[in-house]
Amino acid sequence: MSFRVFLFFIVLGTIISWVTWGMIVFNSNPEQAGFLVFSLFYLSLFLALSGLIFLVGYWFKKKFFKKQLPFYRVKSSVRHGVFFAILILSWAILKSHNLSRWWNLALLILILAILEFFFISTGKNNTYVDSDPTTQTTV
């Protein structure tokens, strides 16, 4: 699959997720909604936020890290999109149950930061393209 097809499906999925989330928000009553409606609400919001954060993150990385290989831009943008969506959704779920405290969010941020450092440390060192192709080394 080419990158353009991949990006097309990400944009399409993000748009569908936002439309689904909007339909749930405007067409359901939270006082009468069951577990399924809340699950679909949070799932569509997670997918919409992940896609949006991925697209914005990839655009910024493409703009500012021009020497970074596209595969690593996509890889880190997907990871950051998922992590930030988890952070936002966790805060929303905690807020809806009146459990949103600063120490809960600090613990969640710490866990996500440890996961990010783990993924960074297991990554390869060849994430940037050297300007001279004869000096490139692969690990």
Image (cartoon, rainbow, N blue to C red):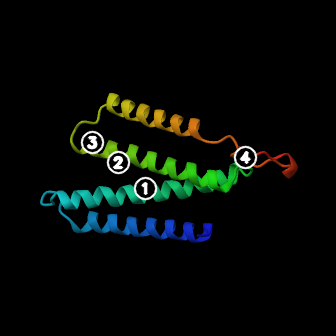
Q: Residue at x 62, y 52 (%)?
A: 73
Residue bearing mark 2 = 89
Callout 3 crowding tier (Cα within 10 Å): few <14, some 14–19, many ≥20: few
- Please tell me which of labels 1 and 4 falls first in the chain: 1
Give the SS element for disc 1.
Answer: helix
Neighbour class for label 2 at 10 Å: few (<14), some, many (≥20)? some
* 7 in relation to 129, above or below: below
Residue corresponding to mark 1: 49
- Identify which amino acid the numbered label 4 is placed on: Tyr
Q: Is 65 situated left or right of 132 in this image?
A: left
Label 1: how many Cα within 10 Å (few below 14, some 14–19, many 20+): many
Q: Whole-Å distance between the Cαs marked 3 and 2? A: 10 Å
Residue 100: horizontal and vertical position, in percent? 28, 36
Any mark on residue 82, and which? none
Q: Quadrant of residue 95?
A: top left
Q: Is 38 displayed left or right of 118 in the figure?
A: left
Q: Amino acid at mark 2?
A: Leu
Q: Amino acid at mark 3?
A: Lys
Q: CA distance from mark 1 to mark 3?
A: 18 Å
Determine contact: label 3, label 2, CB under 8 Å: no
Q: Residue 128 shows which numbered tag?
A: 4
Q: Residue at x 58, y 35 (%)?
A: 121
- Residue 53 horizontal/vertical position (percent): 50, 54
Does the rendering let one see residue 60? no
Q: SS of the residue at dot 2?
A: helix
Do the residues under discs 2 and 1 have CB atoms within 8 angstroms?
yes
- Whichever of callouts 1 and 3 sits on the residue coming sooner in the sequence is 1
Position of the N terminus, as image quadrant, is bottom right
Q: Would you say the residues marked 1 and 3 are in contact, meaning their CB atoms lie under 8 Å apart? A: no
On the image, numbered disc 3 is attached to which residue? 95
| Mark toward the start of the polypeptide (3 vs 2) | 2
Work out how far the residue at label 2 is from the one at label 1, CA to CA, in angstroms.
9 Å
